[in-house]
Each structure stands twice: as structure tokens, then as C-alpha cells.
Image: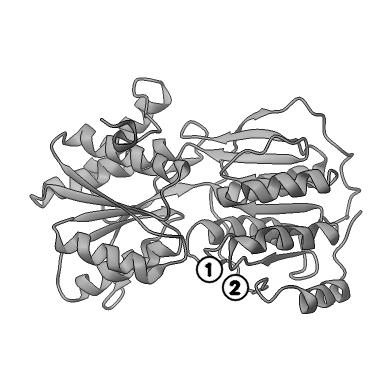
Amino acid sequence: MKKLLTLSLVILLIFSLTACQTNTPAPAPAPTEETPAEETPADETPAEEPAPAGEKISVGLVTDTGGIDDKSFNQGTWEGVVRYAEEKGLVLNEDYSFLQSISDADYIPNLSQFADQEVDLIVAAGFLFEKAIQEIATNYPDQKILFIDAVVDAPNVMNAVFAEHEGSFLVGVAAALKAQEAGKNMVGFVGGADFELIQRFEAGFEQGVKMVDPDMEIVIQYASGFDKAEEGQSLATKMFDDGCYVIYHAAGGTGNGVIKEAKDRATEGQDVWVIGVDKDQYEEGFYGDGSKSVILTSMLKAVDEAAYVAAKSVEDGTFQGGIHMFDLKANGVRIPEENPNLTDEWVQKINEFAEKIKNGEIEVDPVPSRVKGN
């Protein structure tokens, strides 16, 4: 059984690159609903027997440049690690911890640091890790890795992938219904970077909007990264000024700037809305006395569940490499259970579309029309 020794961790953290930071945010409440994933694992058999009763596993999370407190993707993944750790009585910074990446150059050093410490599971949050995971998986063939949002074909890598386009379709429906109610004809999308993964958010959102109103205008903007809150706010400023009524962001920490701009405007009495991503961002949208939120709804990705499931599989000896799909049918993408800013009628309509996607009546294209040249 491999353990993180407190003294070793302290020494390693002192001598690590200044870009590699370990912080300790307050653990978020555990999600109330567990969502099992539909799996298509590789042919490999589990690498080891279950840990003996009473044994603990160790987990190390490496964030991308969005940071642990991005209130979105990284934070959601960490919440899954925390949920598992609290259930099993793991000790923070002894049995589980995280390292933040300030730039792409930090990915391999941070991953290597945990691998050298022989943690039982490394969690890498984000598709930007792809090349780094390929290298680490090769250099440390016995190291178990959970890679979220992309695929590295290696027997020691569990790849958690999500049907972002399906969940984004649902919030596109919500955006269009809200805009129609207000007599508006323009909504918008802000992506953290113009990559294929983020394009899936754009594609689903676009199709959901058009399903409700084929003539509604959709403004598309991409930022230069996922840690650019000021840039996100600047993009939102122009989009709201140009007439966008609802903006859906898939931009991590950059999306916090989009939310801030909406909150500032709502405080001044303007009627504008934002759709959150990855985790329920309703509380992030509170303004004024905190009784109202600018978050219309959120597109949830079960990144917390992916982290939890991977840790549990290491503990019980069922960890397998391969692709583990978290789609709408597996409840891997969805809207929140509670949506205070959506009417019951809208929620019912969104749920009807969800069922049609699940049973194949509607097939959501993961490629946006602008990319296809339509």
C-alpha cells in the first residue's frame, strides 16, 4: 500500500517549482445524487487486488491553469475527491491533496511530483493535459491516472469523457425560451479557448436555441484561456451592449468575469442573464441582497462523480483503463434539480427534449455550424 508521508510532501513542496502551489479550499458539500457512468472499458483486467480492510488510498489532483477555485471545472473535480476522502477518513495533505498549474509548463512537473510520491491515483482535470498524460503514463506504467475530458490510450489511464453537446442543447433551449419571453432575439456563447472540446458546448447550445427559434441570433466569442476573468468580463460587456440577452459560458475561471458583468448590470437594474457550466453556479450569480441570481440555469458535468468513481475503483481493485462515457443517458450531463429562474413549463419542455435525446429521436451534432461552414 502506497502512502503519502507528511514529511515527504512538505519537503517536495518546498523544493517544487514556484509555479506548483498547494492550496486548501474549504471542502464543498457532497453532491446529493450519485450518477453511475456507462462504461466501455478497455480489455485490460484490474491491475491489483482490493486494498485490505482499513487501508487508505492516496489521491493527488492536478488542475489546469484555471485553478482549484475556478468555481467550475477544477473545483467540481476537487469536490469529488473531497467527497470520497471524507467518506473514507482521508487526511488532507497526507492522503489527498492538489497542485495547481500556473502554465502549461507545470503539467509534467506537477504530475511527476505525485507519481514520484507514488500516490495511488492521480487525477488530471482537463483536455489540456493530453500530451503530459501520454508522457507520464509511459514513464510511470504502474501509476493509475484518471484523465478527465480527453483520451489517452494507455492501460493505466481511465479516461472520463462527457457528452457536453447533449447537455448544452438543453441549456440552449432554456436560453431561447427566456429570450422569447422577454421579446429578445439574441443570445451568446463564450468559450475559454477555441478547441474541439469547447466547440461541443457551442454546437449543442446552438442546436438547442435553434430548436426553439430557428431565427434567433447567436453571437459566438472565444477568450484566450480559462483563467482570464477580466477578458471574460470584457467580452460580456460588448455582447450585452450589442443586445445579447443570455450568455452561456464554457470558460472556467474566465466565465467568472462573464458572471460578474451580468451581476454588475443586474445591480443597476438591467435585465441580463448567464448560463453556468460544469457545476451549479446559481449562488455565484447572487447580487444585491442575495435574494436573486443572474444564473438562468447551469449545464452540469459530473466531473465530481468521475473523480469519486475512479478513487473508489482503485480502493476496491476494479480500476481499468479505457473510455468511461458520461452522457445524458448516464446522467453525466444535465441541468440542476432546482432551477429557480426557470418556469415549471420550461423545465418540463427541457426534460422532454432530454428524453428525445436519450431515446435517439434527437441526435445532437458535436460540431458547430461555423466549423462545418454551414
Residue 162 placement, left or right of 42:
left
Residue closest to the eye, 347 or 6: 6
Q: Is residue 107 above or below residue 366?
A: below
Residue 240 placement, left or right of 1:
left
Q: Residue 31 in the image: x percent, y percent?
A: 54, 54
Q: Residue 291 in the image: x percent, y percent?
A: 28, 71
Q: Quadrant of residue 95?
A: bottom right
Q: Which residue is mark 2?
A: 25
SS category of the residue bearing label 1:
loop
Q: Is residue 285 visible?
A: no
Q: Residue 169 in the image: x percent, y percent?
A: 33, 38
Q: Check the picture and name the quadrant holding the C terminus.
A: top left
Q: Residues within 10 Å of mark 1 (few under 14, many from 20)?
A: some
Residue 69 numbered tag = 1
- Identity of the residue drawn at 56% across and 41% down: 35
The amino acid type found where label 2 is placed reads Pro
| Cβ atoms under marks 1 and 2 closer than 8 Å | yes
The amino acid type found where label 1 is placed reads Asp
Q: Is residue 172 above or below residue 89?
A: above
Tell me which label, 1 or 2, sits earlier in the chain: 2
